[in-house]
Image (tube, grey):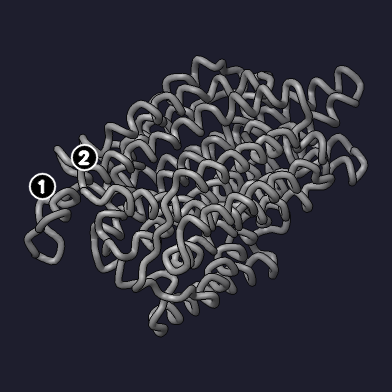
Amino acid sequence: MLNVALPSIARSLGASASQLQWVVDAYAIVFAGLLLSLGALGDRVGRKWVFMDGLVVFGGGSAFAAWSQTADVLTAARALMGLGAAALMPCTLSILTNVFTQERDRVRAIGVWSGTTGLGVALGPILGGFLLAHFWWGSVFLVNVPIALVGLMAAAWLVPNSKSPSSLRPDGLGAGLSTLGLGVLLWGIIEAPDRGWTSPFIVGSLVVALVVVGVFVAWERRIDHPMLPLAFFAHRRYSVAIAALALVLFALLGMFFLMTQYLQFDLGFSPLEAGVRMLPVAVALLIIAPLSVLVARSIGTKYVVSAGLALVAISFGLLSRTTVSGTYRDCFVPFVIAGVGVALSLAPCTESVMGSLPKQQPGAGSASSDAALQVGGALGVAVLGTALNLRYQHLMAPVVARASVPAPIQRLIESSLGAALTVAHRAPKKLGSELATLARRAFVSGMDEALVIATAVVAVAALVFLPSRGLPDGAAPSGDEKSLYSP
């Protein structure tokens, strides 16, 4: 829903392109940074209660977001929503693996759980578009409140409580370091188009991010109750699946961030029409995700995941050929291919993560898979959005300079396509039409460049994840490892 609402938020709050990226990524930073600690807390004090607390915070943050008056306040509200989501999301998979203890049942349950992602992707843009057609942009957040209330009542009645007697105490310092490191890294990436990559602030932020991440790794190695047990990554099944999950969401959320703006700003669709036209991605995800785990167990997880990543790369390559005079028909087939590719990767990787960890640590498995999704999605929005902004500003700056417009208007036009179109709407007809055409061309050029970058990243990942003829470390696979390394 948020992606469909971005153009409306840009117009109503006067948000720049970088502010829109922060509205999306503030949620992901807090979510990813606290997932592991709050997942461990659920294992320790009771998953049902942490799940319900998360619903309360998420619902409250949604109400706060709905009535935000500035982009900065909205960003803070999104961070609060991320805190609630970090509490409730790890508990969902932990509860499932606790209820469905047989492997066959667990695989089916996780397949259905992954399918609900497709349902959310399907309903979110359409419901968001419907709300925006009848109400103000805040309604896309306010709708979460009754959903949270229903979730609370259902959880109190249906969800059994469970916890792990051997669970470790939460790692507060690890959570703080991971959140700080990710936040500073994304700040540098997102702010670079406005400040310049050689700016002391940007260079300093990237250096600080590397230092903080290094301290985080050293701390996690040292303590006896790490937020993220680094020993997990010695298990190839786990580490490969985590990397694939991050790349899948890098692609999916990056594409949604770009294409929902393209459909509305360039093709002229309303929010509801744009939401309906994103449906092919969601329908493919909804249908294929529950089946993908079964296919993976028949022919090997790495084959299925590699094929999924390859399809995502193909879809991005096709979308990167989009032009300012294109039509929705140019997007339809790539959207379907992208949905199938994501579906083939998402559920098998999630099942691999959950199946590769000790049964007494489902919270750590659930939280680490969710963290990979959120970090990947946040980086997708940050990296692809920044690539778009750099290209857009590079093309628009000389055009605006030649027009000799006042400096505040110049900064507004260069900040985002939405702002440029607002200026164009208020300008004299001929001048406004020319400005709108140039801004749309610059935006599409930047979008295509971002999609080329994404194509390259995902294509390389697909090749890396292809099964090798040999086995890792020369060892023979056993049990679950066969699903990842079957030749």
- For label 1, the SS is loop
Of badges 1 and 2, nearer the viewer stands 2
Q: Is residue 117 above or below residue 436?
A: below
Give the labeled residue for mark 1: 487
| Apparent side of residue 315 relative to residue 212 in the rendered image (left or right) | left
Which residue is identified by label 2?
296
Q: Is residue 235 in sight in this rendering? A: yes
Could one spot residue 211 in this view of the protein? no
**As rendered, which of 389 and 14 lies closer to the eye?**
14
Mark 1 belongs to which amino acid? Pro
User: Foreground residue, 407 or 483?
Assistant: 483
378 w.r.t. 226: above or below: above
Q: Quadrant of residue 206?
A: bottom right
Horizontal arrangement in the rendering, residue 162 relative to residue 275 (left or right): left
N-terminal of the pair, mark 1 or mark 2, is 2
Q: Residues within 10 Å of mark 2 (few under 14, many from 20)?
A: many
Give yes or no for contact between labels 1 and 2 (Cβ–Cβ under 8 Å).
Answer: no
Extreme-left residue of the structure: 476
- Residue 336 position in % (x across, y down): 41, 24
User: In which quadrant of the rendered image does the N terminus lie?
Assistant: top right
Asked whether 119 or 99 is in front, the reply is 99
Q: Is residue 429 left or right of residue 110?
A: right
Q: Residue at x 45, y 55 (%)?
A: 90
Q: Residue furthest front?
A: 157
Residue located at (49% from left, 27% from top): 321
Cα separation between marks 1 and 2: 13 Å
Question: Which residue is drawn at the image coordinates 44% and 69% (left, top)?
Answer: 44
Question: Badge 1 local density, few (<14 within 10 Å), some, or many (20+)?
Answer: some
Quadrant assignment, res 129: top right
The x, y position of residue 295, in whole percent, is 21, 35
